[in-house]
Amino acid sequence: MATEQNQITDGMHLMVDALKMNGVETIFGVVGIPVTDLARRAQEVGIRYIGFRHEQSAGNAAAISGFLTRKPGICLTVSAPGFLNGLTALACATINGFPMIQISGSSDRNIIDLQQGDYEGLDQMNIAKPFAKAAYRINRPEDIATGVARAMRAALSGRPGGVYLDITTAMLSTTMDADAAQKTLFAPVEPAPRQIPSHKAVERAMVLLSQAKKPLVIIGKGAAYSQVDEAVKEFIEKSGIPYLPMSMAKGLLPDDHALCAAAARGLVLANADTVVLLGARLNWLLSHGKGKKWNADAKFIQLDIDATEIDSNRPIDAPVVGDIGSSLALMLEKLHEKSLPQFTDWLAEIKKTKEVNAAKMATKLACTNLPMNYFSALKAISDVLEKHRDIYLVNEGANTLDDTRNVINMYHPRRRLDCGTWGVMGIGMGYSIAAAVTGKRPVVAIEGDSAFGFSGMEIETICRYKLPVTIVVFNNNGIYRGTDKNLGGGDDPSPTTLTIGARYDKMIEAFGGAAFNATTPDELRDALGKGIDSGKPTIINCVIDPAVGVESGHIGNLNPKTSIKI
Ligand code: OXT
Ligand code: ADP
Ligand code: MG
């Protein structure tokens, strides 16, 4: 946009124009030299700017907003330290396959390249490269539109990911003729083109499926991201194959669906003879598709947009490389031509195990001991959330994560947002803010007390923007539990211990939010209902028995095994 008097513009104004032209509606960031005016200008032209307290949370917000909208979320950071603070979120976005662009101001190239000690001088683009799907630098205003287009395409096409876009201080202040500048602007055409799989691949997959006696579909967050919810549902229901939702794919079909095998996970992995991977990687969360948890003779069909994912952990018998929507459409055509046999015995076997596990779960949920344990607290939460099935659920911690995942049913796609592929702590408040801002619905965040600490200061952001976020802190005084002792016998707390009896609810009072301390299921139900109904920022300090947590939750087996007992 030109400044009226002299018909010139500069890199900063043109950058905002380019973002606007690319449909950017929100920027998540922290301002300072050299990007403050960029944020001001963005607000001026109607792009919403959400200012955070730490770049990692801004980056996490951008990443999850990308997952929810299929448009790259934008994170704005200042040079060097701000850039580095955002980089963890960029790396997480890349590893999770979420489209995001971290736009960072950077210092004077001449001084950086000769390492002469510029203000916040760092060779940011090269540092970002290993953590990003792509990294670009814009050195001249006339390259802005191209730089933004390249970033958009890289973030969105194929497997989505995090892209780094470096904007130098010099470029931001470089002027150019306003008309000429406007003429450079464009938005990329079809930045995430469909990828149609080969008919041969689809045929091969369907032949394999037609021979299955005990098939299983594993639905991953790639399928959730694709937003082809009806096709996924139709494929499951038309084929009659049971499915296992990965954590962030829960709700694509409701968790109480008759074909949901989540409550018989061990059984279906160990016995399935044909496994269809629907946007799910065979990484650590699926024991790499091999070993004692799996049927060694199982055949694999993998639907994925990324050809290099195939065979990454074990041989794949029938790869279907394409976008899930296109692949499922072709597979559904075949299913309509010829139905699969019914899997009556297999479904009966699964149902039996589900019933056994459901009974075990019911016993745990009925526990009336005080202080509450994870299950009695989650039962109270579930009672409330059953009446609010359309909220976003953000979840992190160890026991808090694993138990919540299994107790709280999801009924809508892309509503469960959690630690994801790296099991990272610190996503809590950033994800909550983005879900409230982008998803425009109430959010409930169920947070371990340690997990909450990683992004807890963002409660000020939540209050400042008056977001409908209710945070339940499962306070068991520590990482996994609060009862460990200092093995040296000194006064310092043990490595896993946090402040005993802390009142996390009190924190939000400083910013005008609502605070509750819940020591019983009734208090918890009451507080959660009030938090959601009020639509106001709320923290519930939920007192959990400090002794009941398990080391590392469900993944204690990943701790190094030592023959010397600690
Ligand atoms: O198969 P069987 O028959 O056994 O049955 C299974 C299911 O069928 C059944 N089930 C059910 N039964 C009945 N009803 C229902 N509804 C039902 N649903 C399921 O239950 C069993 C088990 O099911 P599940 O859970 O599906 O199966 P399993 O085998 O556990 O699944 C394996 C996994 C791997 C897929 C699953 O466990 C999973 O997804 N796990 C994710 C784990 C994860 O990501 N954890 C987070 C990381 S832990 C650790 O790293 C932490 N740190 C270190 C740290 C991190 N992460 N990041 C950073 C930046 N810095 C440091 C820290 C600091 S956690 C942490 C903080 C912890 O402390 P907090 O205070 O925050 O939290 P608390 O622990 O609460 O104190
Ligand atoms: P989960 O953790 O839920 O198992 P992962 O993140 O491991 O899921 O795997 C998601 C997979 O989905 C990735 O391999 C990614 O390439 C793939 N994917 C992402 N988007 C699409 C899409 N539109 N079509 C097909 N596959 C996709
Ligand atoms: Mg804890």
Image (cartoon, helix red, strand yellow):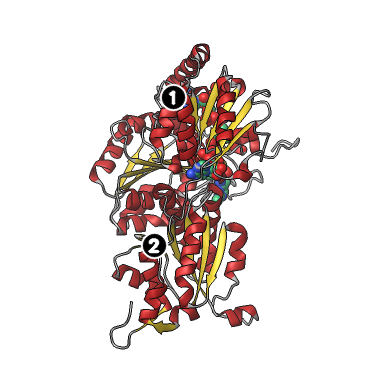
**Circle 2 Cα neighbour tier, 10 Å, few/some/many (<14 / 14–19 / ≥20):** some
What residue is pinned by disc 2? 22
What residue is pinned by disc 1? 336
The answer to which of 176 and 397 lies nearer the viewer is 176
Residue 361, percent across and down? Answer: 45, 22
Q: Nearer the viewer, mark 1 or mark 2?
A: 1
Kindly give the residue lying farthest to the right in the view shown: 563
Residue plotted at (68% across, 35% down) = 314
Residue 317 can be seen in this image = yes
Residue 343, percent across and down? Answer: 50, 15
Give the structural element (helix, strand or loop) at label 1.
helix
Mark 2 residue type: Asn
Decide if residue 523 is on the left or right side of residue 324: left
Kindly give the residue lying farthest to the left in the view shown: 534
The image shows residue 146, relative to residue 324, as above or below, that is below
The answer to which of 23 and 531 lies nearer the viewer is 23
Q: Earlier in the sequence, mark 1 or mark 2?
A: 2
Q: Mark 2 vs ligand 2: CB under 8 Å? A: no
Decide if residue 144 is on the left or right side of residue 519: right
Image-quadrant location for residue 80 = bottom right
The quadrant of the rendering that contains the C terminus is top right
Residue plotted at (46% across, 66% down) = 148
**Circle 1 Cα neighbour tier, 10 Å, few/some/many (<14 / 14–19 / ≥20):** few
The answer to which of 430 and 301 lies nearer the viewer is 301
Residue 271, percent across and down? Answer: 60, 20
Residue plotted at (48% across, 73% down) = 143
Mark 1 residue type: His
